[in-house]
Image (cartoon, rainbow, N blue to C red):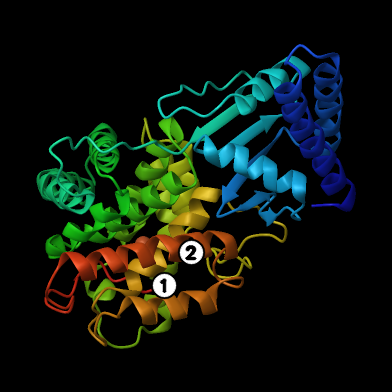
Amino acid sequence: MHHEQATSLYAFIRQLTTAVSTALLYSLDHEQVQRLCTGAAQNLALALGDEPGLSLLVIDDELVAWDRPVETSMYVNRFCQALKMRGIGHLRLLREVTPQELRQMVRLLSKPPLPNDEIRSSEHIRFGRVEVRQSEDSSGASAEDAGRRKIRSLADVPLEELSTFMEIYEEARGNKKLNVSGISEIVGCFINAFKQVADPILALAPLRALDEYTFTHSTNVCILNLAQAMSLGIDGALLHDIGIAAMLHDIGKLYVPEEILTKPGKLDDSEWDMIKQHPLRGAQRLLDTPGVPRLAVITAYEHHLKYNLTGYPRVQEGWQQNLCSLMTTISDVFDALRTKRAYRESMEFATISAIMQDLSGTDLHPLLTRNFLQIISRLSDAVSSASPEPDTSTPPLSTPEQGTP
Ligand SMILES: [Fe+2]
Ligand SMILES: [Fe+2]
């Protein structure tokens, strides 16, 4: 971000936050609120320059714009808190935002947050809300018991859906039609299952038992992506597309011979070239398939690009990676590391976490990695407290990801 952009964004946040305090102290109709909203709209337009819109993410207690944390200040902190209290983790502001729309936002941020309050996006302000999950348990059992009970019911969902996914995959391998609506249904099922548990990341635990299928890697990446996206407050159609993109990210591997994918030793140059083709082949296949979200095409193409734009395929300088691709790369690396390979055992969470921290900033997006590792540390705690056995009993065996470190 340029210095002027940052200054204008900062002025936007300051004016908006001051408008919220003014509305709280006086009223929403106070002329000062109107003036501040007009000024904020102007500053937002300045911050955007030629860009059509700006996404703001609340990660931890930090506000992220243009992939970078916004320098903290009292106003930025207040703004973050106000969003967080209402479960808003993602905010998309379009160029055409009007002072009236900002005034609606001020109204929202100056009202006390209520758990079931509907947060409506307007034409040019789109909110991504973190689901407010309430315990449905009324029997007096502890939250932990309730969580475990729901895990059991959740575990049935992937089993049933996975066999459908296996059929879809096998059909696609036979160069037949790719059943996009089937995949979309599976993703919908995962999302629903996620929303039923108190902590969606707990849904990952039962998947360990299902790792005998080669396509499980895609399912794991899907669930890890959904967990990342939901933690950022992404919901609705975008969340669904992110799940579909993850399910299909490695579809290009259907064109790589099985012997190469599972080869235990080192790959020779021509074999390695074939592996490197899978993002492009996958993106082409998806582009030719009706009903595939564009995001899935982009993600298939970009998922082996590193944060510093090395990796493959080669892209020009200044290439802007999609948020979904950045998340998929993180989920992909994690799943590859925790998967048992012909040449090594699966790794412990602590080891994986250390490796991923090392890759952060070069291979992986730093803020998204930090967010991911926080999710995973909760998973690690949940797994160790939920199962009495050490988690070496059933090492996962899924599609080897030869291209990842
Ligand atoms: Fe891949
Ligand atoms: Fe992959």
Out of 228 and 386, give the one closest to the viewer. Answer: 386
Whole-percent x, y for residue 345 in the image: 24, 84
Please tell me which residue is depicted at 82% across the width and 31% down the height of the picture.
45
User: Which image quadrant: the C terminus?
Assistant: bottom left
Question: Does the Cβ of the disc 1 residue fall within 8 Å of ligand 1?
Answer: yes
232 vs 360: above or below: above
Residue lying at the far right of the rendered structure? 4
Residue designated by label 1: 403
Looking at the rendered structure, the secondary structure element under dot 1 is loop
Out of 19 and 11, give the one closest to the viewer. Answer: 19
Name the side, left or right, on which 313 lies relative to 48.
left
Q: CA distance from mark 1 to mark 2?
A: 7 Å
Looking at the rendered structure, the secondary structure element under dot 2 is loop
Whole-percent x, y for residue 148 in the image: 15, 52
Whole-percent x, y for residue 296 in the image: 43, 44
Question: Does the Cβ of the disc 2 residue fall within 8 Å of ligand 1?
Answer: yes
Residue 254: quarter of image: bottom left
* Disc number placed over residue 304 in the picture, else none: 2
Whether residue 277 is visible to the viewer of this picture, yes or no, is no
Dot 1 or dot 2, earlier in sequence = 2
198 vs 86: above or below: below
**Circle 1: is it few (<14), some (14-19), or many (20+) Cα within 10 Å?**
some
Residue 373: quarter of image: bottom left
Query: Is mark 1 in CB contact (under 8 Å) with mark 2?
Result: yes
Mark 1 is on which residue type? Gly
Mark 2 is on which residue type? His
